[in-house]
Amino acid sequence: MPFSKYLRFLAALLLAACLGLAPVPALAAGPVMVFAAASTTNAVSEAIKAYEAAGKGKTVASFASSSTLAKQIAHGAPAQVYLSANEKWMNYLAEKELLEPGTRVDLLGNRLVLIAPAGSKERGPIKARMPLLQWLGDGRLAMGDPDHVPAGIYAKQALKYLGLWEQAEPRLARAANVRAALALVERGEAPLGIVYATDAAITPKVTVVGIFPESSHKPIVYPLALLKGQATPEARAFWRLLRSDEAKGIFKKYGFSVR
């Protein structure tokens, strides 16, 4: 049916409903719109496949830095489910009263690691005053932009704790999200990078140099919530799936800790 005829058809139905002559049929539910931190791409994509394979409906996901997604939501992006890589950006939306009451939960945890391209020579352990500049040589340290990307924020905290931030800051390759930082190391464009353990685990093109002590940064927490006014039955169903035993198994497979 041509679009103009379709509009006239809808208008006729609405007029008939107003006159009490015919009911307006319920519109088909659209796909669930999920905004999730870039570091969850593989795990959430697999959870979506499981959700759709079970015949529960369609889901569309947008993966990016938690900060980028939160700002998009604040400016009216049609997200229904939001999974952040830190509490800061979930709090940002909470302060704007954009979260559906009673749906915010802490879903996942992660670890922070130092990586190098696969086949790189071994380096010493992660510790205070380690020779980071010597390891970098003429290259840069790839990490999420510490001004807004959660992985970068955690990395800055860790480097400060280890007494390395002042020497590291001028040598940063600031990436738009943690997966972009990972890609720089994968391609050999940066000799070192700081990413989540789950990111390092998805590619054979990098090797983990060391794991940052958990005491060196704030706990890595991934909060999940539905967006206010967007908590449709379908969105709630997907929100429940992410908290299910099935999803927990998926997240664990990719290296996340489940809360």
Image: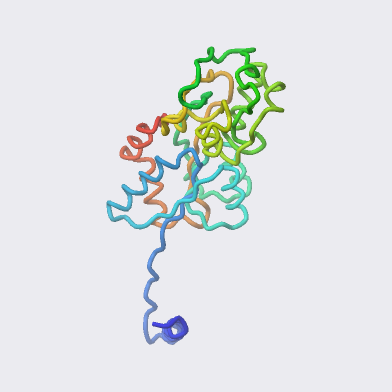
Q: How far across and down, in percent of the image, does residue 41 sit?
A: 44, 42
Above or below, 28 relative to 177: below
210 lies left or right of 29: right
For the point 66% across and 30% down, the residue is 172
| 20 relative to 199, above or below | below
Q: How many marks?
A: 0
Q: Is residue 87 left or right of residue 160?
A: left
Instruction: Compare residues 106 and 2 and report the one nearer the observer.
Output: 2
Residue found 46% across the figure and 26% down from its top: 118
| Colouring method of the image | rainbow
Q: Nearer the viewer, residue 210 or 36?
A: 210
Q: Quadrant of the N terminus?
A: bottom left
Please give left or right for residue 28 compared with residue 215 in the image. Answer: left
How far across and down, in percent of the image, does residue 207 sit? 46, 24
The picture quadrant where one finds residue 156 is top right
Residue nearer the viewer, 128 or 182: 182
Q: Position of residue 8 (x, y in %)?
A: 46, 86
Residue 204 is situated, as x and y percent measured from the top left of the image, at 41, 30
Task: Please say if 44 is above or below 114.
Answer: below
Identified at 40% across, 85% down, the residue is 20
At a point 62% along the width and 18% down the height, the residue shown is: 132
Q: Quadrant of the C terminus?
A: top left
